[in-house]
Each structure stands twice: as structure tokens, then as C-alpha cells.
Image: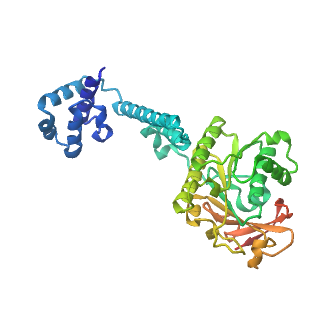
Amino acid sequence: MNWISTSEIVFGMVLNGTIPPEFIEPRLLCTPYPEGLQVFKETKSYTSVVDKIGFDFVRVAKEAAATVDSSWDWLDLLHKAASREQLADFFERESKNLRRGGELDFGGVAAALDKSRTHREDRYITLDQVEPGDVSWIETNYEPIDANMWGVPASSLTIIGGPPGTGKSSLMLELCGIAARELRKKSLIFTFEMTTRQIVKRLLETNPLIRKEDRKLLVATEDILTIDEVYSDASRLVSMEPGAYQYICMDFADLMLEREEDEQSVGYIYRKCATLAKKTNTQVILISQLSRAYVGGLPRVHHIRWSGLAEAMAALILLLYNPNQIFANQGKDNRLPDIPGMGYIIQGKSRFGYKMEGGVGAVQVEWDGKQAWGHQSMGWYPL
């Protein structure tokens, strides 16, 4: 079938109501049908179309449309054709960009492929096909979190925040090490601050029982990547082994910024992380620094950089507090006792409710001063 015949059929199906005019790209039709399509989009008037392109062109188009197999889903066929056209245009632009010495848009590649695979009808489901269920929590096998917070929310973003030196990376590696050693689950670690050698050293400090065979389940990169590159790589790796990964970890948020830190750029990171968790059905852990507004004392959710966006996107926010750290000496909170060798994991926000009475609170955990957290709860303190 040539271009002229295809244009006649498609335009005729627009006129008879089989295909909505908004779904057709005018440049895909031969003359004079782009003009007729534009008039029909604006007026929905058959007479206006005849006045614009002439009765003979309209008659031929309607007759051509009447000859096609009515059992075909033309809307779906055109949707697939348009998706292929858009995908080809995208990769043609990327090819030219690469030849000019530019960098590949990894995020754009992932988005283009996702869009090409997704049909409009696949996005929706009637709710009679869905069984009701409670919010799913994933046990971490780390007792302070499981006993006091149920675990971490499934397929969601967890943010770990706190002042420098309070063991944010150590807690992240504690969870990854337990997942490997006890659950035989993989973790994908994007370490932007430390090298992989430093990560292994810290891992052995926080998980002295971890074996070399366990470390095979921990996949890491020390390359500095943008959030779009992280999204692309993580989506690809996790999709290759469904159900194999417990966590996707990023240490830390600020080092994924491509430009100056502002609400838009940081918010984009939070949104991408939350979307990645849902798309991959994997728990995403993002380490975040505190804002300049934090000058010591008990850290709170509003101390996280651009905390409004963090609170909106994260299902769980954990804040780390060690009263004996230098940053805390500027102001202590008497609600959490200052006990040598003890630190606190504060459950600052939980989208799906709180396990312990009183809601927001902190679990006391041993802290050995070498950025390693203990394995047992030493008490719960409502805040």
C-alpha cells in the first residue's frame, strides 16, 4: 500500500469517526489531507473540509475507508506506528549527537523504550480484577528497624538523613550486608562519595561476619552518574533478574546534581528515586545531607535539604542522631538520653503509619564510635 492510498484510508476513517483526528500527525499524510485534517480538528465540520480541499478528495477518502477490514484495531495499529516513528526520530537525534562527540542521554533512552513498549490500554485495569490488600512492608532482618517500624515499605523510597559522621553510609551497608548474608538478596550500590575499596572496608567494619561469597551479591559502581543515568542503569540491571534485588542504594543525593542545587533539581532526584522504586518493585535507599539550617541538636525532617519535596516523595524517612558527635554539642535534646556508646535511629516520617505507640519516635541502638551500628534495640522513645 503506497503513501497516497494510506493517506486516503486514514483521512476517511477520521471523517467517519473511526479514528479521533487528534491522534493523527498531519505530516504523515500526503497533500491535501494535512490541510483537511487541520480544518476538521478545528471545526469538526464535514462541510468545512469539503470547502477547504474539495468534494472529490473527501469522496475518495470515505470510499477508501469503507474498503478496510472493520475487524482491525486501526487505532492500536496507528498507535504502534506512531511509537515506532517517535523511537526512530529519538535514536536518529542521539546518533547525530554521539557523532558530534556528545554524551548519550541514558534517561532519554530508557524513557523512549518504556514509551514504545506501553500501549494506552495496558495502563488501565478494572478494579474487580484487584484483590484488596494491606500496605506491604519488607523485613530487613535488622532488628532495630523491623521491631520498631515493621521494616521498610515495599517498592518505595526510603531517605536516610543526618549530620556528617553519624553513620548514614554504615547503616545503608548494614542493611545491604544483612540482605546478602541472611536473605541471599542482591543490592545495587551507587557510591558517589567513597570508592569501592572504601565501601568494602566500611562493609567489613559493619558486617564482620560477611563472607566473600556474600559480597558477590553486592553490585557497586563508584562512577559519578546523573540521576537519569542511575535510573537507566538500575532499571536495566534489576529487570534482568526479577526479584533478585532487595535494595537500590545511592550515596548521596547531592552528588547526582548536574547543575546548581535548587528546589527543581533536588526535587527531580527525589521524584526519580520514588519512580524507580515503583517501576522496579525494589526498595530504594537514598542518603541525604542536612540543610544549612541544621546547627546541631536533634535532627528533624525539615532539616533535610528541600525537605518538602523529600517528605512528599519518600515513604519512610530515617534520621540519625548521636548525641556525643561534635555536631550535636551545639544543642542537645533531653528527650533522647545522652549515653556513651549509644545512638538513635529516628523514624521521622512514615507514609503508611507507625508501629510503635505515639507515632514518630526514635530507637536507641549501640554505636561503637567507628560508624558501626549495633544489631539490637535498646529502647524506644516517642518524640
In the rendered image of this protein, does residue 60 appear above or below residue 269?
above
Give 38 or 276, whichever is nearer the viewer.
38
- The quarter in which the C terminus is drawn is bottom right
| 249 horizontally vs 227: left or right | right
Give 337 or 230, whichever is nearer the viewer.
230
- The quarter in which the N terminus is drawn is top left
In the rendered image of this protein, does residue 377 appear above or below residue 157?
below
* Residue 379 percent coordinates (x, y): 80, 68
In the rendered image of this protein, does residue 25 appear above or below residue 227?
above
- List the single residue furthest toward the top: 1
* Residue 159 percent coordinates (x, y): 65, 59
* Residue 374 percent coordinates (x, y): 84, 60
Q: Residue at x 61, y 60 (%)?
A: 352
| Residue 119, picture quadrant | top left
Give 305 or 145, whichever is nearer the viewer.
305
> Is residue 16 at all visible to an observer of this figure?
no
- List the single residue furthest toward the front: 100
* Residue 268 percent coordinates (x, y): 54, 55
| Residue 270, picture quadrant | bottom right
In the rendered image of this protein, does residue 109 appear above or below residue 256?
above
> Is residue 318 at all visible to an observer of this figure?
yes
